[in-house]
Amino acid sequence: QVQLIESGGGLMQAGGSLRLSCAASGRTFIYWYMGWFRQAPGKEREFVAAITGSRSSTYYVYSAEGRFTISRDNAKNTVYLQMNSLKPEDTALYYCAAVTRPTLATMIRNRDRYDYWGQGTQVTVSS
């Protein structure tokens, strides 16, 4: 059974930075696509960023381009989301998710393709 545990959320002023971490259990982590999604109150869960397995290609939602960086450490079974220049509209519950089945990279933004989800970590950005 795959478990994903997020950490690193918190309260931050606009313009600040946070780094989220997601520790995963599982022996084949290196092959998984890993993603970060977020859900604000009253809104649908949306794609933020994702990274493929061994080649570590990265994908971002337009609003995160240039501010957020997703990375992974396969030796530690961990994926990170470095968030800089935070804005109040980044406030949300952030979820880590994993795609463990063979999947086209073109589907990486689709939340329905993800097999496992963490419990989420809250990020609140004040103005």
Image (tube, helix red, strand yellow):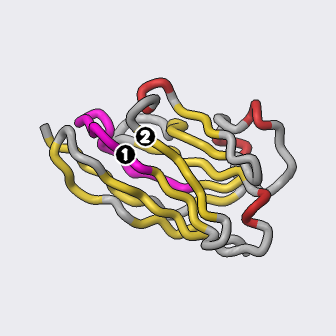
Tell me residue 102's x, y (percent): 86, 49
In this image, 123 relative to 50: left or right? left
Q: Magenta segment range? A: 82-96
Image position of 36 with respect to 47: above or below: below
Residue type (three-letter) at the residue carrying disc 1: Met
For image coordinates 73% across by 44% down, the residue present is 113
Q: Residues within 10 Å of mark 1 (few under 14, many from 20)?
A: many
Q: Which residue is mark 1?
A: 83
Magenta-drawn stretch contains 89? yes
Tell me residue 49's x, y (percent): 54, 40
Dot 2 and dot 1 residues touching (CB under 8 Å): yes
Tell me residue 50's x, y (percent): 60, 43
Q: Nearer the viewer, residue 21 or 44?
A: 21
Label 2 element class: strand
First-in-chain label (2 vs 1): 2
Magenta-drawn stretch contains 66? no
Between the C-alphas of marks 2 and 1, the distance is 4 Å
Image position of 67 with respect to 119: above or below: above
Q: Which residue is mark 2?
A: 68
The C terminus, quarter of image:
top left
The N terminus, quarter of image:
bottom right
Residue type (three-letter) at the residue carrying disc 2: Phe
For image coordinates 47% across by 43% down, the residue present is 69
Q: Residues within 10 Å of mark 2 (few under 14, many from 20)?
A: many
